[in-house]
Amino acid sequence: MAADFGRKLDARRWAGWALALAPLAFLAVAFFSPLWEVLRRGLLVEGQWSTDLLRAVLADQYVRHLLSFTLRQALLSTLLSLVLGFPLGWLLTRYSFPGKRSLKALTLVPFVLPPITVALGFVLFFGHAGHLNQALMWLLRLSEPPIRLLYSLWAIVLAHAFYNAPVVARFVNVAWEAQDPALTEAARVLGAGRLRSFITVTIPGLFPAVLSALALVFVLCTLSFAIPLALGGARYATVEVGVYLLARVYVDLPRTAALAAVVLGISLLLTYLYLRGGGLFHTLSSADRRQPTVPLACRRHPARLLWLGYLIPAGVVFAGPIAAVIADSFLRAAPGGASPTLHWYRLALSTDTSALLGASPLGSITTSVAVAAAAAGGALALGVAISASLRAVRSRVLETVLMAPLGVSSVVLGLALLLAFRRPPLSYLPPGPWPLVLAHVLIVYPFVVRSIRPLWQSLDPSLVEAARTLGATRREAFGSVELPLLKPGLLVAGALAFALSLGEMTAAAMLARPGLNTIPLAIYQFLSARRFGAASAMATVLMVVTAVAVLLWERLGRVGEAAEQ
Amino acid sequence: MRRLYCVAMVLMLAVGLSGTADELVVYTYDSFVAWGPAQEIKEKFEETHPGTELVWIAPGDSSEMLSRLLGELELGLPTADVFLGAADVEVPRALDHEAFLPLEPQLITNLKYVPDDIRLQDDAYVVPYDYGYVTLVYDAEALPDEHVPTTLEDLLHPELADKIVLQDPRTSSPGLSFLLWTIAHFEEGWTDFWRELLPNVLTVTRGWTESFEMFEAGEAPIVVSYSTDEAYSYIVHGDLRYRVLTPSGEGYRQVEYMGVVRTTDSPDLAHSLLDIVLSHQVQELIPTSQWMFPANQDADTPADFQEHAIVPENPVALDMDAVEEKLEEWISEWQRILVES
């Protein structure tokens, strides 16, 4: 009996490894071999393994500046995200006010809002001739713009905080709501003041969540690309931007490869540390009782009006740039004011090749949508295969290998594919946006795996066993039992993959060529030529397409939840 | 699921199939398309060669586009047939990478109108199409008279903090010309000048277009640009709001060249394009669209342009051999100063 069971388990393991073959083969061709080529270029000097190039790059003052600037801005951005995000998390947990649900939903926006639209919004809103300065100059009758934020380090830091403060707020909110209110009540009963119980009970309870949020924000800001590229000028560049500039703008391939090896090391290390530290957050006990809330606007507690001191500036920082993008897409500058127009949308939907984009604007939109659809399809197929094999085989090595792209910076991945498409087997692919599709599949499929694995684990194995008892083959059982149950989760993962691919700009910037352009790149190109109307129309199109995908995602997710119950 | 795949496949096919007509791809810089006679050149070329489409590709400034061309050649990626817009100081870099086919000057009949002093190496690889002088330009309405600099040293005055916009010499040819100008002017002292200049610089842009648009939008009142901008101000805006500064009568001479990319399948069409660019019809458009001096000396220039386009009294240009030898060193030194500031 025991031997029989063992054999069965073995068979299952073998089936799992067999399932892993296709994804492994795919990753070998599209990921590991291209990455190996980058490392070879960075570490192989005249046929000999050598750290000469690497050392030369690390000794280079420009590279050192890139590294130190990257870490400095990531640290500052993380701190500012905490400062801006913690009060929001607090507000969402402790107070009740009209519009709270919508505000909470809005904290999800940064997960899908493409960074280039934020950068554009910042230029339009905070520029010396931008909306905020214009308004302040008019209000205060100044002759010089009072806010000199753009073109400095602080523009990048504030844009990162715009992006990541909601992440912090969400983590704080979730952790705080899970805290048992009995703890603070006990402290209060034992004589602790409000402040003391806050500092000695509430705050320590939130520590794991805050740390975990800060770690995530730090990783995201270190590997940030579009925001420093668009807001940094020549003076400020992160390592990701550095690799892009060296590869595609200054064109210095040996240095690019060596710097890419460094960036690869950094991204793997940070991802490893983050995943190791991610456990911190799960130690929370969930409370039986919800945290009590108090109304924000209350005549008996006028001190709560102090929240306006946070809400008004935060509202300006968060809503201003996005509003500026949408407004400018419908406005045309004219002497003595701006007039409403649809000109920019006609331009964004034009089929004439624009020299600035190296493609037509509409072509950039269709490429983006086609690539996102193909990448979502590919990522789903890959994600299902990988989840299936990881379900059958519990092997840390296999999991690490199959999930490795998660830890690789997008700019390095883009460089790897740029080089790989010159050699067989990838050079045999017919002409088309394949490099971009592959890059996006590799970037988004780990998210697909992470969103379907828990769902699959939670399926009752007896369902499949019942189908098998009734005579179904394993494949039939998968097709008729598991797949329908996983479908809502798959649709959600597909929509997320679609949205992520649409907004992805790092690998796209590495792989773009005449005729192959995407919406985020078009926004960047219009932005750097300071054609703000065209850039804003493109950005609005991108936000609308993304929002439709995300709404669909949320709706399908809700249907999925209802189906589960 | 299957439906999603079908949609994806159809879209991919649509994307893959588009753009297969006969094309002559020309790389140039963004402002040549936004300002210069690119559209007229395209029309004239397509009229002369029915069935072939001329495609301009210009997502960056000249040095950036040249780097892109050289990178694509090195990696064996598909690239342009013609490159238009290599500044004289950039030509050695392109020739080092063997970017261009040897020219057949007899196919470019309009070359006879181009004076010898702007032609290079017997027209072996590149021919000029226009030239100008990199100088400083300021907005007379935004900058009080007492702050207007009259020498390069005046740019260091603390009143000009955050008031100057210039271009990255790694990506932009006016940016590079300005750097070479300061090297020619200050010699060994150029590094000190830049250390003091950078605090007054609002931002260093990747290309000329972004900096000039910032200047026109009122983000900063001083920009590194061309000595013809007074003519632009006069002819387009009807006043002399944009004034050209030629500190100590200086300005850096910049000649712009074009060449046929070595990997092209259609060298004859490429030569024909070069000839069209040098034709009177196109060259006469150069002054008031591209705002440069035409290479074709026989082309007429409008009287307003002749009156307001400034030619510096003491044009500066470093010896080409010195530039070729030291450029890399200067750029990395400049880069070091930039990141330390």
Image: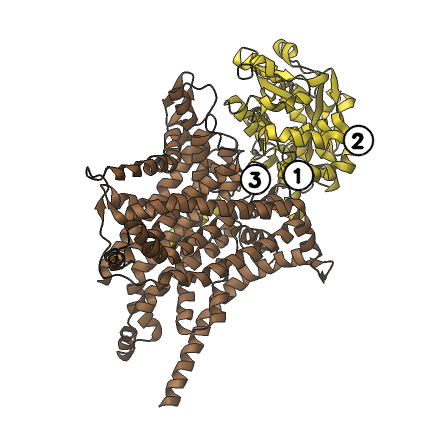
Identify the hue of chain A. brown
Q: Report the amino acid beneath label 1.
A: Gln
Q: Secondary structure at mark 3?
A: loop
- Tags 1 and 2 on a common chain: yes
The residue positioned 74% from the left and 36% from the top of the image is: B327
Q: Amino acid at mark 3?
A: Tyr
Q: Nearer the viewer, residue B248 or B235?
A: B248
SS for dot 1: helix
Whole-angstrom CA distance, mark 1 to mark 2, is 31 Å
Image position, residue A459 (x, y; %): 30, 69
- What residue did someone put label 1 on? B335
Give the label on residue B121, or none: 2
- Asked whether B324 or A266 is in front, the reply is A266
| Image quarter of residue A241 | top right
Q: Which residue is mark 3?
A: A236
For disc 1, the chain is B
Do the residues under discs 3 and 2 have CB atoms within 8 angstroms?
no
Chain B shade: yellow
